[in-house]
Image: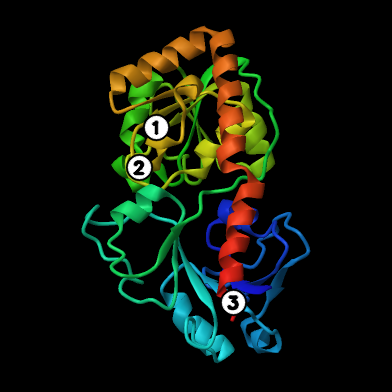
Amino acid sequence: MRLLVWHVHGSWTTAFVQGKHTYLLPTVDDRGPWGRGRCGRDWPASAVEVQPGELREHDVDAVVLQRPEEIELTHRWLGRRPGVDLPAVYVEHNTPREHAATTRHPMADQDAIPVVHVTHYNELMWDNGTAPTVVIDHGIVDPGHRYTGELPRAAVLINEPVRRGRVVGTDLLPVFAGAAPVDLYGMETRDVAVDGVTPVGDLPHDALHTEMALRRVYVHTARWTSLGLSLLEAMHLGMPVVAVASTEAATSVPPDAGLVSTDVADLTSAVSALCADHDLAMRMGKSAREYALARFGLDAFLRRWDVLLDSLAP
């Protein structure tokens, strides 16, 4: 199929474009949010940058929507209406931004465009009304088993930790830093000034994985986001995980791969124990990788998407 899809979330799109289709990526001159193109990523040749004015020259089979505004953009650029003249699905990457259980989804109460949630938790919490929904778990391009854990330090990845604050658990950094030195990765981390926390910044993907895998444990601090792909990538690397038991993280880390809890004292104790026991960390990291490959492997992700996309064909 020829699929129109915006580059919104880099890690998710990286997995999505590994399939057997042609992926048409809107690309505008300033590479802004409505046309980022490939952004220089090492994607297959089937991920094709297309200027909006050229889209009508392509025989688009379906559109993969991710933001409400893309419905109008599709109509404007293609002259076809998603769900009416053009098969469409809507991928919801996020938890509700306001009230957890009562927020209406922008695609609620229509039956022309299925809503694809990336976690069962998201499907549960959004008020989807009568809209058809399906859950397709994340898939990860396997970075390979890189874990050495030779540094008794904790790796944390938070994008924009100052702006996002408690939502992503920035306030918990000093607590975890009391259990082990913390290396903080992600966008706009330089303004974090916390004793025991070293802001590293935003690294290229491959370098990030290599650096994370040197650290003894991955710590997932988010209170209220969708399932962070950095958590799943850490598990693929073979890292043991200590995670706040919130949203889908509570069901994504088995007991033999680390600790998931709402008790911060238990979480910090687990970080201390793993940093003190390299053999334990290695065993838990091995279990984390095995589980991640089985549940969040790329092949299963692409198969589930193919089933859904095939169902859109007229």
Residue type, label 1: Ala
Look at 43% across and 49% down and name the residue there: 119
Label 2 sits on residue: 247
First reached walking from the N terminus: tag 1 or tag 2: 1
The image quadrant of residue 255 is top left
Label 1 sits on residue: 193
Element class at badge 3? strand
Report the mark closest to the observer, 3 or 2. Answer: 3
Q: Position of residue 48 (x, y in %)?
A: 72, 70
Instruction: Name above or below for residue 141 compared with residue 72.
Output: above
Give the mark count.
Answer: 3
Report the mark closest to the observer, 3 or 1. Answer: 3
Which residue is more in the foreground, 39 or 231?
Answer: 231
Residue type, label 2: Thr
First reached walking from the N terminus: tag 3 or tag 1: 3
Q: Position of residue 309 (x, y in %)?
A: 59, 68
Quadrant the N terminus occupies? bottom right
For residue 62, which numbered disc appears in the image?
3
Q: Position of residue 15 (x, y in %)?
A: 63, 53
